[in-house]
Amino acid sequence: MAAKATTTIKQVLNHQAEHGAWFAANQALFNRVTAFYFGVIQAHEKVLALSDKDALTALEKLTHTTQSNPTPVMPLEEILEDIPALFRRAAINAALGSARSFSSHLQQWRKRKEKAEAKGKGFHERPPVPPRAWNKSATLYAGMWKERAGSSMVMKVWTGTCWSWVKVRIIGRDLPTDAEIGSPQLIRRGNQWWLHTPVEKQFKSPGKIEKQVTTNAQTRMCAVDLNINEHLAVCTIQTVEGTILATTFIGGGRRISGFRKKQLGRIARNRSKTGIIAEGEQDNADLWRKIRQVDEQVAHLVSARIVQFAQAHQASILVFEHLGNLKPEKGKYSRRGNNKRAYWMKGRIFNYAKYKAWHIGVITSRVNPANTSRECHRCHSLVIRYNAGERAEGYTPGASLVRCSHCWMQGHADRNASLVIGQRLIARYQTPLKEKPHAPVRRAGREEKSSGVALSQEAKSKSRPSTDLAGYGESNEHGTAQDGLLRMDERLSDIPCQLRLPFE
Ligand SMILES: [Zn+2]
Protein backbone atom coordinates (compact mmCIF):
# COMPACT_ATOMS: atom_id res chain seq x y z
CA MET A 1 0.00 0.00 0.00
CA ALA A 2 2.94 2.34 0.64
CA ALA A 3 2.94 4.38 -2.50
CA LYS A 4 6.41 5.78 -2.25
CA ALA A 5 9.94 4.65 -2.91
CA THR A 6 12.91 6.72 -1.81
CA THR A 7 16.20 6.98 -3.63
CA THR A 8 19.06 9.43 -3.46
CA ILE A 9 20.22 11.34 -6.50
CA LYS A 10 23.92 12.20 -6.28
CA GLN A 11 25.21 15.14 -8.24
CA VAL A 12 28.59 16.85 -8.36
CA LEU A 13 28.78 20.58 -7.79
CA ASN A 14 30.79 22.76 -10.08
CA HIS A 15 31.54 25.93 -8.19
CA GLN A 16 33.99 28.78 -7.92
CA ALA A 17 37.16 27.88 -6.06
CA GLU A 18 36.47 30.10 -3.06
CA HIS A 19 33.05 28.54 -2.59
CA GLY A 20 34.67 25.26 -1.61
CA ALA A 21 36.07 27.00 1.46
CA TRP A 22 32.62 28.43 2.21
CA PHE A 23 31.00 24.99 2.02
CA ALA A 24 33.64 23.71 4.41
CA ALA A 25 32.94 26.59 6.81
CA ASN A 26 29.23 25.90 6.49
CA GLN A 27 29.72 22.23 7.30
CA ALA A 28 31.98 23.06 10.24
CA LEU A 29 29.32 25.36 11.65
CA PHE A 30 26.64 22.74 11.07
CA ASN A 31 28.69 20.28 13.10
CA ARG A 32 29.34 22.79 15.86
CA VAL A 33 25.63 23.48 16.15
CA THR A 34 24.80 19.76 16.00
CA ALA A 35 27.38 19.00 18.69
CA PHE A 36 26.00 21.86 20.77
CA TYR A 37 22.50 20.39 20.59
CA PHE A 38 23.78 16.91 21.32
CA GLY A 39 25.21 18.41 24.50
CA VAL A 40 21.93 20.15 25.32
CA ILE A 41 20.11 16.84 24.92
CA GLN A 42 22.61 15.04 27.16
CA ALA A 43 21.97 17.71 29.80
CA HIS A 44 18.20 17.32 29.38
CA GLU A 45 17.71 13.64 28.68
CA LYS A 46 13.96 13.85 29.13
CA VAL A 47 13.82 15.47 25.72
CA LEU A 48 14.40 12.03 24.24
CA ALA A 49 11.06 10.82 25.57
CA LEU A 50 9.32 13.36 23.34
CA SER A 51 8.35 13.03 19.72
CA ASP A 52 10.73 14.69 17.28
CA LYS A 53 8.35 17.57 16.90
CA ASP A 54 7.98 18.17 20.62
CA ALA A 55 11.69 17.63 21.20
CA LEU A 56 12.40 20.30 18.61
CA THR A 57 10.08 22.70 20.41
CA ALA A 58 11.64 21.89 23.77
CA LEU A 59 15.19 22.26 22.47
CA GLU A 60 14.40 25.58 20.87
CA LYS A 61 12.94 26.76 24.14
CA LEU A 62 16.15 25.79 25.91
CA THR A 63 18.39 27.55 23.42
CA HIS A 64 16.68 30.03 21.17
CA THR A 65 16.29 33.61 22.33
CA THR A 66 12.99 35.23 21.42
CA GLN A 67 10.81 37.99 22.75
CA SER A 68 8.85 35.48 24.83
CA ASN A 69 11.95 33.48 25.70
CA PRO A 70 14.53 36.17 26.49
CA THR A 71 16.88 34.08 28.60
CA PRO A 72 17.13 30.48 27.40
CA VAL A 73 19.08 28.09 29.60
CA MET A 74 21.75 27.32 27.03
CA PRO A 75 21.73 30.07 24.42
CA LEU A 76 22.73 29.07 20.92
CA GLU A 77 23.86 32.66 20.40
CA GLU A 78 27.04 31.75 22.23
CA ILE A 79 28.09 29.83 19.13
CA LEU A 80 26.87 32.33 16.58
CA GLU A 81 24.19 34.97 16.39
CA ASP A 82 21.53 34.98 13.72
CA ILE A 83 21.72 31.38 12.64
CA PRO A 84 18.82 30.87 10.23
CA ALA A 85 15.94 28.93 11.79
CA LEU A 86 16.06 26.24 9.12
CA PHE A 87 19.78 25.70 9.56
CA ARG A 88 19.21 25.42 13.32
CA ARG A 89 16.37 22.95 12.88
CA ALA A 90 18.33 20.77 10.50
CA ALA A 91 21.13 20.65 13.10
CA ILE A 92 18.66 19.92 15.91
CA ASN A 93 17.21 17.02 13.97
CA ALA A 94 20.68 15.71 13.20
CA ALA A 95 21.58 15.95 16.90
CA LEU A 96 18.33 14.25 17.88
CA GLY A 97 19.07 11.38 15.52
CA SER A 98 22.53 10.90 17.00
CA ALA A 99 21.27 11.25 20.56
CA ARG A 100 18.47 8.73 20.03
CA SER A 101 20.89 6.29 18.49
CA PHE A 102 23.42 6.77 21.29
CA SER A 103 20.72 6.42 23.92
CA SER A 104 19.39 3.18 22.47
CA HIS A 105 22.90 1.70 22.22
CA LEU A 106 23.47 2.65 25.82
CA GLN A 107 20.22 1.03 26.92
CA GLN A 108 21.02 -2.18 25.05
CA TRP A 109 24.45 -2.23 26.64
CA ARG A 110 22.91 -1.79 30.11
CA LYS A 111 20.49 -4.63 29.46
CA ARG A 112 23.27 -6.97 28.38
CA LYS A 113 25.25 -5.95 31.44
CA GLU A 114 22.33 -6.60 33.80
CA LYS A 115 21.63 -9.93 32.16
CA ALA A 116 25.22 -11.02 32.49
CA GLU A 117 25.40 -9.89 36.09
CA ALA A 118 22.11 -11.60 36.92
CA LYS A 119 23.63 -14.83 35.65
CA GLY A 120 26.75 -14.19 37.65
CA LYS A 121 28.87 -13.95 34.51
CA GLY A 122 31.63 -11.47 33.97
CA PHE A 123 30.83 -8.56 31.64
CA HIS A 124 33.73 -6.88 29.90
CA GLU A 125 32.04 -5.05 27.04
CA ARG A 126 32.84 -1.37 26.97
CA PRO A 127 29.92 1.06 27.16
CA PRO A 128 29.16 3.05 24.03
CA VAL A 129 30.57 6.57 24.05
CA PRO A 130 29.05 9.70 22.62
CA PRO A 131 30.63 10.91 19.38
CA ARG A 132 33.96 12.63 20.01
CA ALA A 133 34.16 14.28 16.64
CA TRP A 134 31.34 15.38 14.41
CA ASN A 135 31.47 14.97 10.70
CA LYS A 136 27.94 15.37 9.53
CA SER A 137 26.92 16.82 6.21
CA ALA A 138 24.69 19.86 6.30
CA THR A 139 21.10 19.26 5.31
CA LEU A 140 19.53 22.13 3.42
CA TYR A 141 15.92 22.45 4.45
CA ALA A 142 13.55 24.19 2.08
CA GLY A 143 14.29 27.85 2.61
CA MET A 144 18.04 27.30 2.56
CA TRP A 145 17.95 26.64 -1.16
CA LYS A 146 16.00 27.99 -4.07
CA GLU A 147 15.82 28.26 -7.83
CA ARG A 148 16.68 24.62 -8.36
CA ALA A 149 16.77 23.99 -12.06
CA GLY A 150 18.23 21.10 -14.02
CA SER A 151 21.78 22.35 -13.90
CA SER A 152 21.92 24.99 -11.21
CA MET A 153 20.76 25.89 -7.75
CA VAL A 154 21.10 28.75 -5.30
CA MET A 155 21.78 27.93 -1.67
CA LYS A 156 22.38 29.82 1.53
CA VAL A 157 25.64 28.98 3.28
CA TRP A 158 27.79 30.26 6.12
CA THR A 159 30.95 31.55 4.47
CA GLY A 160 32.88 31.77 7.70
CA THR A 161 32.03 35.43 8.12
CA CYS A 162 28.45 35.83 6.93
CA TRP A 163 25.41 34.11 5.45
CA SER A 164 25.43 34.24 1.70
CA TRP A 165 23.38 32.97 -1.21
CA VAL A 166 25.61 31.05 -3.59
CA LYS A 167 24.78 29.85 -7.05
CA VAL A 168 26.28 26.52 -8.08
CA ARG A 169 26.26 24.46 -11.24
CA ILE A 170 25.06 20.90 -10.88
CA ILE A 171 26.54 18.07 -12.91
CA GLY A 172 25.21 14.58 -13.26
CA ARG A 173 21.96 12.75 -13.35
CA ASP A 174 18.96 15.04 -13.49
CA LEU A 175 16.31 14.86 -10.84
CA PRO A 176 13.43 12.73 -12.03
CA THR A 177 10.44 14.81 -13.02
CA ASP A 178 8.04 12.28 -11.58
CA ALA A 179 9.27 12.36 -8.01
CA GLU A 180 9.02 14.39 -4.85
CA ILE A 181 12.23 16.17 -4.00
CA GLY A 182 13.47 16.06 -0.41
CA SER A 183 15.94 18.28 1.42
CA PRO A 184 19.35 17.96 -0.23
CA GLN A 185 22.57 17.40 1.69
CA LEU A 186 25.80 19.17 0.90
CA ILE A 187 28.42 16.45 1.04
CA ARG A 188 32.20 16.51 0.84
CA ARG A 189 34.11 13.73 -0.90
CA GLY A 190 37.78 14.63 -0.91
CA ASN A 191 38.05 18.00 -2.58
CA GLN A 192 34.78 17.58 -4.35
CA TRP A 193 31.41 18.78 -3.11
CA TRP A 194 28.29 16.80 -3.90
CA LEU A 195 24.62 17.34 -3.57
CA HIS A 196 22.69 14.29 -2.39
CA THR A 197 18.97 14.70 -2.86
CA PRO A 198 16.47 12.18 -1.55
CA VAL A 199 13.62 11.73 -3.98
CA GLU A 200 10.42 9.93 -3.38
CA LYS A 201 8.70 8.34 -6.27
CA GLN A 202 5.03 8.02 -5.99
CA PHE A 203 2.74 5.67 -7.75
CA LYS A 204 -0.89 4.79 -7.91
CA SER A 205 -3.20 6.04 -5.21
CA PRO A 206 -1.82 8.11 -2.37
CA GLY A 207 -1.48 6.57 1.06
CA LYS A 208 -4.25 6.96 3.56
CA ILE A 209 -3.98 10.12 5.55
CA GLU A 210 -3.83 8.30 8.85
CA LYS A 211 -0.88 6.24 7.72
CA GLN A 212 0.96 9.20 6.24
CA VAL A 213 0.46 11.24 9.37
CA THR A 214 1.23 8.56 11.92
CA THR A 215 4.18 6.86 10.25
CA ASN A 216 6.15 9.74 8.80
CA ALA A 217 6.78 12.92 10.76
CA GLN A 218 8.16 14.51 7.59
CA THR A 219 4.88 14.16 5.71
CA ARG A 220 4.08 17.55 4.28
CA MET A 221 0.63 19.05 4.29
CA CYS A 222 -0.65 21.98 2.37
CA ALA A 223 -3.36 23.67 4.44
CA VAL A 224 -5.67 26.15 2.77
CA ASP A 225 -7.67 28.98 4.26
CA LEU A 226 -10.29 30.14 1.77
CA ASN A 227 -11.54 33.67 2.11
CA ILE A 228 -13.87 36.12 0.54
CA ASN A 229 -11.55 39.07 1.02
CA GLU A 230 -8.53 39.95 -1.11
CA HIS A 231 -6.73 36.71 -0.40
CA LEU A 232 -8.98 34.12 -1.92
CA ALA A 233 -6.71 31.41 -0.60
CA VAL A 234 -3.83 31.41 1.85
CA CYS A 235 -1.83 28.19 1.75
CA THR A 236 0.86 26.98 4.12
CA ILE A 237 3.13 23.98 3.94
CA GLN A 238 4.01 22.29 7.20
CA THR A 239 5.31 18.89 8.16
CA VAL A 240 3.50 16.59 10.55
CA GLU A 241 6.20 17.34 13.13
CA GLY A 242 5.39 21.02 12.82
CA THR A 243 8.06 22.63 10.69
CA ILE A 244 6.53 25.42 8.67
CA LEU A 245 8.10 25.45 5.23
CA ALA A 246 6.24 27.88 3.01
CA THR A 247 3.30 30.22 2.65
CA THR A 248 1.57 31.62 -0.36
CA PHE A 249 -1.19 34.19 -0.74
CA ILE A 250 -3.44 33.81 -3.74
CA GLY A 251 -4.96 37.21 -4.30
CA GLY A 252 -7.41 38.75 -6.66
CA GLY A 253 -10.39 38.67 -4.34
CA ARG A 254 -11.01 42.38 -4.46
CA ARG A 255 -11.03 42.48 -8.22
CA ILE A 256 -13.37 39.53 -8.62
CA SER A 257 -15.61 40.97 -5.95
CA GLY A 258 -15.60 44.39 -7.60
CA PHE A 259 -16.36 42.87 -10.96
CA ARG A 260 -19.26 40.86 -9.58
CA LYS A 261 -20.65 43.79 -7.68
CA LYS A 262 -20.69 45.88 -10.81
CA GLN A 263 -22.56 43.24 -12.79
CA LEU A 264 -24.98 42.57 -9.96
CA GLY A 265 -25.62 46.28 -9.65
CA ARG A 266 -26.48 46.40 -13.34
CA ILE A 267 -28.82 43.47 -12.93
CA ALA A 268 -30.52 45.19 -10.02
CA ARG A 269 -30.95 48.38 -12.01
CA ASN A 270 -32.40 46.46 -14.93
CA ARG A 271 -34.84 44.77 -12.61
CA SER A 272 -36.05 48.00 -11.16
CA LYS A 273 -36.87 49.34 -14.57
CA THR A 274 -40.46 48.70 -15.36
CA GLY A 275 -41.97 48.46 -18.74
CA ILE A 276 -38.93 47.05 -20.44
CA ILE A 277 -38.88 43.75 -18.61
CA ALA A 278 -38.40 41.58 -21.65
CA GLU A 279 -35.39 43.48 -22.79
CA GLY A 280 -34.07 43.68 -19.28
CA GLU A 281 -34.33 39.94 -18.85
CA GLN A 282 -32.25 39.24 -21.90
CA ASP A 283 -29.76 41.76 -20.69
CA ASN A 284 -29.64 40.14 -17.28
CA ALA A 285 -29.20 36.67 -18.68
CA ASP A 286 -26.07 37.92 -20.39
CA LEU A 287 -24.85 39.54 -17.22
CA TRP A 288 -25.46 36.38 -15.25
CA ARG A 289 -23.57 34.33 -17.79
CA LYS A 290 -20.68 36.74 -17.53
CA ILE A 291 -20.61 36.42 -13.75
CA ARG A 292 -20.81 32.63 -13.89
CA GLN A 293 -18.00 32.43 -16.40
CA VAL A 294 -15.71 34.58 -14.36
CA ASP A 295 -16.51 32.75 -11.11
CA GLU A 296 -15.86 29.47 -12.84
CA GLN A 297 -12.55 30.56 -14.27
CA VAL A 298 -11.38 32.06 -11.01
CA ALA A 299 -12.28 28.86 -9.15
CA HIS A 300 -10.23 26.87 -11.64
CA LEU A 301 -7.27 29.21 -11.50
CA VAL A 302 -7.23 29.44 -7.72
CA SER A 303 -7.60 25.68 -7.26
CA ALA A 304 -4.84 25.10 -9.80
CA ARG A 305 -2.56 27.51 -7.98
CA ILE A 306 -3.25 25.76 -4.68
CA VAL A 307 -2.40 22.34 -6.09
CA GLN A 308 0.62 23.72 -7.92
CA PHE A 309 1.91 25.18 -4.67
CA ALA A 310 1.30 21.91 -2.81
CA GLN A 311 3.16 20.04 -5.53
CA ALA A 312 6.08 22.46 -5.60
CA HIS A 313 6.60 21.80 -1.90
CA GLN A 314 6.08 18.05 -2.05
CA ALA A 315 2.96 18.11 0.06
CA SER A 316 1.07 14.84 -0.04
CA ILE A 317 -2.01 16.02 1.81
CA LEU A 318 -4.26 18.97 1.11
CA VAL A 319 -6.35 20.26 4.03
CA PHE A 320 -9.31 22.61 3.97
CA GLU A 321 -11.88 23.46 6.56
CA HIS A 322 -15.53 22.56 6.13
CA LEU A 323 -17.41 25.44 4.63
CA GLY A 324 -19.96 26.00 7.35
CA ASN A 325 -23.22 27.74 6.60
CA LEU A 326 -23.73 30.73 4.44
CA LYS A 327 -24.33 33.65 6.72
CA PRO A 328 -27.11 35.82 5.32
CA GLU A 329 -25.92 39.36 4.70
CA LYS A 330 -27.95 42.46 5.01
CA GLY A 331 -27.74 45.30 2.60
CA LYS A 332 -28.09 45.92 -1.07
CA TYR A 333 -28.95 43.27 -3.60
CA SER A 334 -25.50 43.48 -5.11
CA ARG A 335 -23.88 43.00 -1.72
CA ARG A 336 -26.02 40.02 -0.76
CA GLY A 337 -25.62 38.42 -4.16
CA ASN A 338 -21.90 38.99 -4.14
CA ASN A 339 -21.55 37.40 -0.75
CA LYS A 340 -23.57 34.38 -1.81
CA ARG A 341 -21.51 33.87 -4.92
CA ALA A 342 -18.25 34.24 -3.03
CA TYR A 343 -19.47 31.51 -0.70
CA TRP A 344 -20.33 29.26 -3.62
CA MET A 345 -16.96 29.91 -5.14
CA LYS A 346 -15.22 28.65 -2.01
CA GLY A 347 -17.06 25.37 -2.42
CA ARG A 348 -16.07 25.21 -6.05
CA ILE A 349 -12.42 25.95 -5.31
CA PHE A 350 -12.42 23.11 -2.81
CA ASN A 351 -13.98 20.66 -5.24
CA TYR A 352 -11.68 21.53 -8.10
CA ALA A 353 -8.60 21.48 -5.89
CA LYS A 354 -9.56 18.07 -4.55
CA TYR A 355 -9.98 16.79 -8.07
CA LYS A 356 -6.72 18.24 -9.35
CA ALA A 357 -4.80 17.12 -6.28
CA TRP A 358 -6.08 13.57 -6.59
CA HIS A 359 -4.66 13.37 -10.07
CA ILE A 360 -1.16 14.03 -8.82
CA GLY A 361 -1.42 11.64 -5.89
CA VAL A 362 -2.30 14.23 -3.27
CA ILE A 363 -5.17 13.38 -0.98
CA THR A 364 -7.60 15.99 0.33
CA SER A 365 -9.32 16.29 3.67
CA ARG A 366 -11.39 18.76 5.62
CA VAL A 367 -11.43 19.73 9.27
CA ASN A 368 -13.83 21.39 11.67
CA PRO A 369 -13.89 25.11 10.91
CA ALA A 370 -14.82 26.23 14.42
CA ASN A 371 -12.62 29.15 15.42
CA THR A 372 -9.72 28.37 13.13
CA SER A 373 -9.20 32.14 12.87
CA ARG A 374 -9.34 32.75 16.59
CA GLU A 375 -6.73 30.26 17.66
CA CYS A 376 -2.96 30.83 17.83
CA HIS A 377 -1.15 28.30 15.64
CA ARG A 378 1.73 28.20 18.10
CA CYS A 379 0.09 27.82 21.50
CA HIS A 380 -3.63 27.56 20.72
CA SER A 381 -4.60 30.51 22.89
CA LEU A 382 -7.13 33.00 21.63
CA VAL A 383 -5.59 35.63 19.41
CA ILE A 384 -6.06 39.35 19.15
CA ARG A 385 -7.13 40.31 15.66
CA TYR A 386 -6.69 43.83 14.38
CA ASN A 387 -5.98 45.89 11.32
CA ALA A 388 -2.61 47.40 10.53
CA GLY A 389 -2.36 50.82 12.07
CA GLU A 390 -4.93 50.03 14.73
CA ARG A 391 -4.37 49.12 18.35
CA ALA A 392 -3.68 45.42 18.86
CA GLU A 393 -6.65 44.57 21.02
CA GLY A 394 -9.94 42.72 20.88
CA TYR A 395 -11.09 40.70 17.95
CA THR A 396 -12.06 42.40 14.71
CA PRO A 397 -13.42 39.79 12.31
CA GLY A 398 -11.84 40.02 8.90
CA ALA A 399 -8.91 42.14 10.12
CA SER A 400 -5.60 41.20 8.56
CA LEU A 401 -3.29 40.84 11.56
CA VAL A 402 -3.20 38.63 14.61
CA ARG A 403 -1.18 38.68 17.77
CA CYS A 404 -1.08 36.16 20.57
CA SER A 405 -0.66 37.70 23.98
CA HIS A 406 0.35 34.34 25.37
CA CYS A 407 3.30 33.35 23.16
CA TRP A 408 3.74 36.62 21.24
CA MET A 409 3.18 34.99 17.89
CA GLN A 410 2.18 37.67 15.45
CA GLY A 411 1.49 37.71 11.80
CA HIS A 412 -1.05 37.56 9.06
CA ALA A 413 -4.48 36.42 10.27
CA ASP A 414 -5.24 34.19 7.29
CA ARG A 415 -1.84 32.56 7.42
CA ASN A 416 -2.37 31.77 11.08
CA ALA A 417 -5.78 30.27 10.26
CA SER A 418 -4.23 28.16 7.52
CA LEU A 419 -1.63 26.77 9.93
CA VAL A 420 -4.34 25.97 12.47
CA ILE A 421 -6.32 24.14 9.79
CA GLY A 422 -3.32 21.95 9.02
CA GLN A 423 -2.69 21.23 12.68
CA ARG A 424 -6.28 20.12 13.20
CA LEU A 425 -5.80 17.33 10.74
CA ILE A 426 -2.76 16.08 12.63
CA ALA A 427 -4.54 16.47 15.96
CA ARG A 428 -7.15 14.04 14.70
CA TYR A 429 -4.59 11.24 14.70
CA GLN A 430 -2.64 12.19 17.78
CA THR A 431 -3.10 10.31 21.00
CA PRO A 432 -3.41 12.61 24.01
CA LEU A 433 0.03 11.46 25.20
CA LYS A 434 1.70 12.95 22.17
CA GLU A 435 0.34 16.41 22.73
CA LYS A 436 2.79 19.16 23.35
CA PRO A 437 3.92 19.52 26.93
CA HIS A 438 2.78 23.12 27.00
CA ALA A 439 -0.30 22.05 25.11
CA PRO A 440 -3.49 23.97 24.57
CA VAL A 441 -3.74 26.52 27.28
CA ARG A 442 -7.29 27.15 26.42
CA ARG A 443 -8.96 26.18 23.26
CA ALA A 444 -10.98 28.73 21.48
CA GLY A 445 -14.53 27.58 21.81
CA ARG A 446 -15.50 24.18 20.58
CA GLU A 447 -12.79 21.61 20.25
CA GLU A 448 -12.18 19.77 17.08
CA LYS A 449 -14.57 16.86 17.28
CA SER A 450 -12.74 14.06 18.97
CA SER A 451 -10.28 11.89 17.17
CA GLY A 452 -12.95 9.25 16.87
CA VAL A 453 -14.54 11.14 14.04
CA ALA A 454 -14.56 9.02 10.94
CA LEU A 455 -12.25 10.03 8.18
CA SER A 456 -13.92 12.27 5.74
CA GLN A 457 -15.01 10.66 2.54
CA GLU A 458 -12.14 11.92 0.51
CA ALA A 459 -9.68 10.56 3.01
CA LYS A 460 -11.16 7.09 2.82
CA SER A 461 -11.66 6.98 -0.83
CA LYS A 462 -9.04 5.57 -3.07
CA SER A 463 -11.15 5.88 -6.14
CA ARG A 464 -11.91 8.96 -8.12
CA PRO A 465 -13.27 11.77 -6.06
CA SER A 466 -16.95 12.19 -6.51
CA THR A 467 -16.65 15.67 -7.89
CA ASP A 468 -18.32 15.62 -11.22
CA LEU A 469 -16.62 18.00 -13.51
CA ALA A 470 -18.30 16.85 -16.69
CA GLY A 471 -18.93 19.84 -18.82
CA TYR A 472 -16.17 21.95 -17.37
CA GLY A 473 -13.37 22.69 -19.73
CA GLU A 474 -10.46 21.67 -17.62
CA SER A 475 -11.71 18.19 -16.79
CA ASN A 476 -10.89 16.89 -20.24
CA GLU A 477 -7.17 17.06 -19.87
CA HIS A 478 -7.30 14.60 -17.00
CA GLY A 479 -9.34 12.13 -18.92
CA THR A 480 -6.41 9.86 -19.61
CA ALA A 481 -5.59 9.12 -16.01
CA GLN A 482 -8.80 7.42 -15.04
CA ASP A 483 -7.23 4.25 -13.72
CA GLY A 484 -5.56 6.23 -11.00
CA LEU A 485 -2.12 5.78 -12.41
CA LEU A 486 -0.35 9.04 -12.17
CA ARG A 487 1.12 10.46 -15.30
CA MET A 488 3.46 12.62 -13.37
CA ASP A 489 5.24 14.12 -16.35
CA GLU A 490 1.99 15.58 -17.55
CA ARG A 491 0.79 16.94 -14.34
CA LEU A 492 -0.25 20.50 -14.06
CA SER A 493 2.08 21.51 -16.83
CA ASP A 494 -0.60 23.63 -18.36
CA ILE A 495 -1.34 25.73 -15.33
CA PRO A 496 -0.16 29.28 -15.70
CA CYS A 497 2.20 30.48 -13.03
CA GLN A 498 0.55 33.81 -12.59
CA LEU A 499 -3.02 34.04 -11.56
CA ARG A 500 -4.55 36.17 -14.26
CA LEU A 501 -8.16 36.88 -13.78
CA PRO A 502 -10.10 36.34 -16.97
CA PHE A 503 -11.51 39.84 -17.16
CA GLU A 504 -8.19 41.64 -16.89
ZN1 LIG B 1 0.28 31.79 21.02
Image: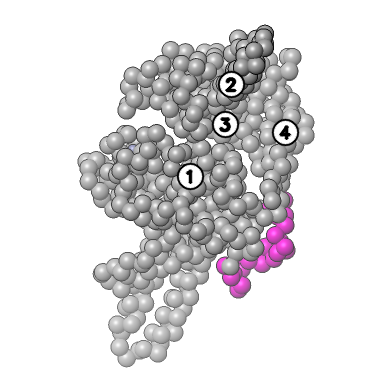
Mark 3 or mark 2, which is nearer to you? 2
Q: Going from the N terminus, do you reach mark 1 or mark 2 first? A: 2
Residue at x-position 37% and y-position 20%: 72
Whole-number angstrom distance, CA of label 4 to CA of label 2: 32 Å
Q: On the rendered structure, is 154 left or right of 241? A: right
User: Relative to the observer, which residue lies in front, 477 or 268?
Assistant: 477
Residue bearing mark 4? 8
Q: Which residues are magenta?
A: 467-491
Amino acid residing under circle 2 = Gln
Residue at x-position 40% and y-position 90%: 278
Q: Going from the N terminus, do you reach mark 4 or mark 2 first? A: 4
Mark 1 or mark 4, which is nearer to you? 1
- Tell me whether circle 1 and circle 4 mark residues in contact (CB < 8 Å): no
Mark 1 or mark 2, which is nearer to you? 2
Mark 1 or mark 3, which is nearer to you? 1
Q: Going from the N terminus, do you reach mark 1 or mark 3 first? A: 3
- Tell me whether circle 3 and circle 2 mark residues in contact (CB < 8 Å): no
User: Relative to the observer, which residue lies in front, 431 or 375?
Assistant: 431
Whole-number angstrom distance, CA of label 1 to CA of label 2: 27 Å
- Residue 387, placed above or below residue 136: below
Disc assigned to residue 430: 1
Q: State whether residue 367 appears in this view.
A: yes
Amino acid residing under circle 4 = Thr
Whole-number angstrom distance, CA of label 3 to CA of label 4: 16 Å
Disc assigned to residue 141: 3
Whole-number angstrom distance, CA of label 1 to CA of label 4: 30 Å
Residue bearing mark 2? 107
In the rendered structure, does residue 170 fall within the stretch colored magenta?
no
- Residue 337, placed above or below residue 45: below
Q: Secondary structure at mark 2?
A: helix
The crowd level at tag 2 (other Cα within 10 Å; few <14, some 14-19, many 20+) is: some
